[in-house]
Image: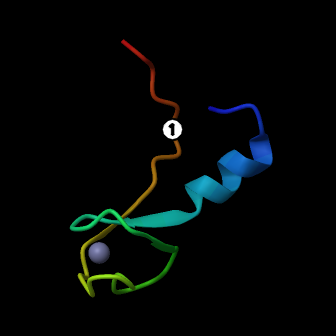
């Protein structure tokens, strides 16, 4: 991940709206922007660049 472990931790604690990709607080049921209930957690696992 990035240079700052704390920043990574905060970023990981976000929920992303599948519809409009707005960042929401973890545990939010609906997107604050579009009201969509389809949320996903940001990935915690490191993604290997290909
Ligand atoms: Zn949304």
Quadrant in the rendering for residue 13:
bottom right
> What's the coloring here?
rainbow
Q: Quadrant of the C terminus?
A: top left
Name the spot of residue 32 as percent of width and height, x first: 39, 85
Give the residue pinned by disc 1.
Answer: 45
Determine the residue positioned at 52% across, 74% down. 26
Determine the residue positioned at 25% across, 64% down. 18
Q: Is residue 37 left or right of residue 30?
A: left
Name the spot of residue 5 as percent of width and height, x first: 77, 41
Quadrant in the rendering for residue 30:
bottom left
Quadrant position of ligand 1: bottom left
Determine the residue positioned at 46% across, 47% down. 43
Q: Residues within 10 Å of mark 1 (few under 14, many from 20)?
A: few
Q: Quadrant of the N terminus?
A: top right
Quadrant in the rendering for residue 23:
bottom left
Q: Nearer the viewer, residue 33 or 50?
A: 33
């Amino acid at each position: 991940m990035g240079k700052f472990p704390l920043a990574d931790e905060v970023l990981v604690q976000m929920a992303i709206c599948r519809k409009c990709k707005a960042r929401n607080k973890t545990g939010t049921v609906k997107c604050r922007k579009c009201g969509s209930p389809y949320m996903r957690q940001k990935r915690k696992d490191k993604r290997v660049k290909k």
